[in-house]
Amino acid sequence: MDSIGRLCPRTAAHCKCRGGQLISVPHRPENSPGVRLALVTNGASAIQRDKIERFDLAHRFDHIQIEGEFGQGKPELAVYRHALEKIGCEACDAWMVGDNYEWEVVAPQKLGMCGIWYDPFEAGVPATASARPTRIIKRLAELVED
């Protein structure tokens, strides 16, 4: 759990006693017992469900939330609150990981979540950013590396 401590100190204390919580990462790390995952995605239900089936993702998540089924999409705060409730996690113990700065950093941080920006092309933090990410990663594997 050292990587969790480096990533978000508030989450580290939580991980030591109950296991971490993680939102929106496309695979369940085999060496991360107790991590609960939610896939939170915008878009039409049929299109997103097709992708989830095509890439065999459903079994990797404890909760899947699609804008077309839920009725709201990111960056609406109700979206994150619902996902957190479904996986039984407090905002201060959760990570949101994704490639949209406003949706995966700014909005989640308003609720107290760790906002981790996936920036594989090293675009950098937007000059007009109203929030700073908890962490910037180039590869999703960085989430579980020591």
Image: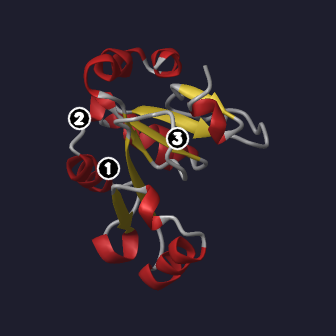
Where, by quadrant of the figure, is residue 118 drawn?
Answer: top right
Residue 36 on image: x %, y %: 35, 44
Q: Residue furthest bottom?
A: 46
Q: Looking at the picture, does residue 63 appear above or below residue 133?
A: below
For marks 2 and 3, the one nearer the N-term is 3
Give the distance between the C-alpha atoms of the residues marked 1 and 2, in whole angstroms: 11 Å
Q: Nearer the viewer, mark 1 or mark 2?
A: 2
Residue at image mark 2: 90
Give the distance between the C-alpha atoms of the residues marked 1 and 3, in whole angstroms: 22 Å
Between 130 and 58, which is closer to the camera in this rendering?
58
Labelled disc at residue 110: none
Is the residue marked by circle 2 packed among few (<14), some (14-19), or many (20+) residues within 10 Å?
some
Q: Amino acid at mark 1?
A: Tyr
Q: Amino acid at mark 2?
A: Glu
The secondary structure type at the circle numbered 1 is helix
Residue at image mark 3: 29
Q: Is 57 situated left or right of 12 in this image?
A: right
Between 78 and 139, which is closer to the camera in this rendering?
139
Give the distance between the C-alpha atoms of the residues marked 2 and 3, in whole angstroms: 21 Å
Is the residue marked by circle 3 packed among few (<14), some (14-19), or many (20+) residues within 10 Å?
few
The secondary structure type at the circle numbered 3 is loop
